[in-house]
Image: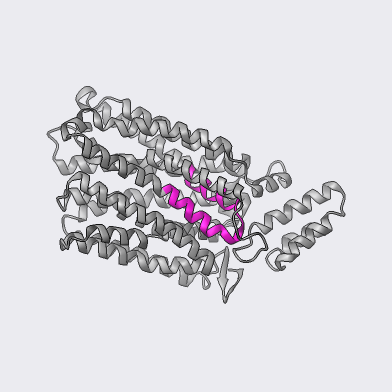
Amino acid sequence: MIVLQAKYYASRIPPSGFAILRAAGAHLAPDHFHKCHTDVAQYESLMPAHATERPVVLSRADHKTLALAALGGALEIYDFIIFVFFALTLAKLFFPPDMPEWLRLLQSFGIFVTGYLARPLGGLVMAHYADRLGRKRVFSLSILMMALPCLLIGLMPVYADVGYLAPLTLLALRVLQGAAVGGEVPSAWVFVAEHVPAPRRGYALGFLQAGLTFGYLLGALIATALARLLTPEQMLDFGWRLPFLLGGVFGVLGVWLRRWLSETPVFLAMRERREAGAPLPLAQVLRAHRRALLPAVLLTCVLTTAVVVLVVLTPTLMQQRFGLAAAEAFALSSLGIVFLNIGCVLAGLLADRIGPWRALLVYSLLLPIGTFVLYASLILDLGTAGVAYALAGLCSGVVGVVPAVMVALFPPAVRVSGISLTYNIAYALWASLTPLGLLALVPWSPWVLVGYSLLMGGVGVGCCLARHRLRWPGLVEEAGSYRRA
């Protein structure tokens, strides 16, 4: 009876009710007590920030888990993103020298975005095992799958050595990296969200996102250092290999760091009550949680917009379109990513303060403002690119708040699979198609990136305004309290 009440009334009872259920369960037989305790733990995990009596200060164990998860994620994202900082160099090395420069750059970016297209398959396979076997195992496997291809890219021959076999090999290695990162991000979100107290979930996920974007910063800093230390000839000769070889070393370090992480309490409680022959997590998502798919896809596209504009396209366009030297472009990009890290943490703190959906509304409005300031500075040559890039980074805090919304859209039993399905498919399509489309439109007008950010900021605002009318799942804030959507 207590188990049934925990299932049915979990969203309605006050925080103290969980303690009452545990106390009552303590008088049951041991096997019944296990069922009661794990059931209560699972449904308590769905309670939103401010709705439980767990400590609002993160413990030392929480800080350790968060730091290790963020650092490992940063090293893995570095392995994935370092390609884009050397897109111009790789275009010269891996394609015929008589090919037009714009076409070589387009094909180089095409190989880069292929990594995004590989994310859904790899992400869904690893998400299945994360929901069935545990978050930690997949969390550790993904970083190893990322590091090995990065190391091989640093060792492989170029077009002058083996002809078209070089870009084909590069393409295959990028596919493997895409499959790895497809399992990393959803697993990381769920791993951290299920470890920390609910009232600090927004901050924890914002800090995690800052850690992941620190991988972008690490790539920009290394690219800046190499551009300053090496001549263009040295970069084409051997310099381009160094960041990829370093990425392989980073990957080994990341695998070692994640040995110290423990499985999430929510998964351990869920495993205690799982029966043999339970439905496949992905099938369960498609059958019972279809209403969560649309908001998850749309919000992923909004998050992707900030990354594509700020991190992927702008550093290259500053060199190709606006004539900045590579060292200056990478330095400005590094500054922007530092403030993106700060913006992610601030967005997470705001989500804990006013609720994830309201924080999402704020940062959806700020996203196009930051992009406008950045490109106005570049196009009009105002001489304020550094300040503008920093402001654009702060205004891109939507990257830090979207995970707090998405984690609440799916229950624990299918959480990684649900996020992986929506996030990876949307990210793959959006991050692979939009850079190519925007690159094709930039010769017409670089203001298209501002229009693109304005459009996607509007999508974020629309999601926030429509969530009640469409009755999207998850816990949402309303009039200072939370209820089921």
Can residue 334 be seen from the camera position used here? yes
* Residue shown at the point (13%, 40%) measured from the top left: 100
27 lies above or below 366 = above
Foreground residue, 330 or 412? Answer: 330
Foreground residue, 48 or 386? Answer: 386
* Residue shown at the point (19%, 25%) measured from the top left: 160
Q: Principal SS element in the magenta part?
A: helix
* Residue shown at the point (30%, 25%) measured from the top left: 156
Query: Which residue is the extreme one toward the front?
Result: 60
- Asked which quadrant contains residue 250, the reply is top left
Q: Position of residue 470 (x, y in %)?
A: 52, 69
Query: Which residue is the extreme one toward the bottom?
Result: 479
Q: Position of residue 76 (x, y in %)?
A: 43, 40
The colour scheme is one colour
Classify residue 398 as left or right of residue 444.
Answer: right
* Residue shown at the point (16%, 52%) measured from the top left: 321
Magenta range is: 183-212
Q: Position of residue 315 (x, y in %)?
A: 25, 49
Asked if residue 190 is among those painted magenta in the image, a careful observer would answer: yes
Classify residue 395 as left or right of residue 105.
Answer: right
Classify residue 237 as left or right of residue 247.
Answer: left
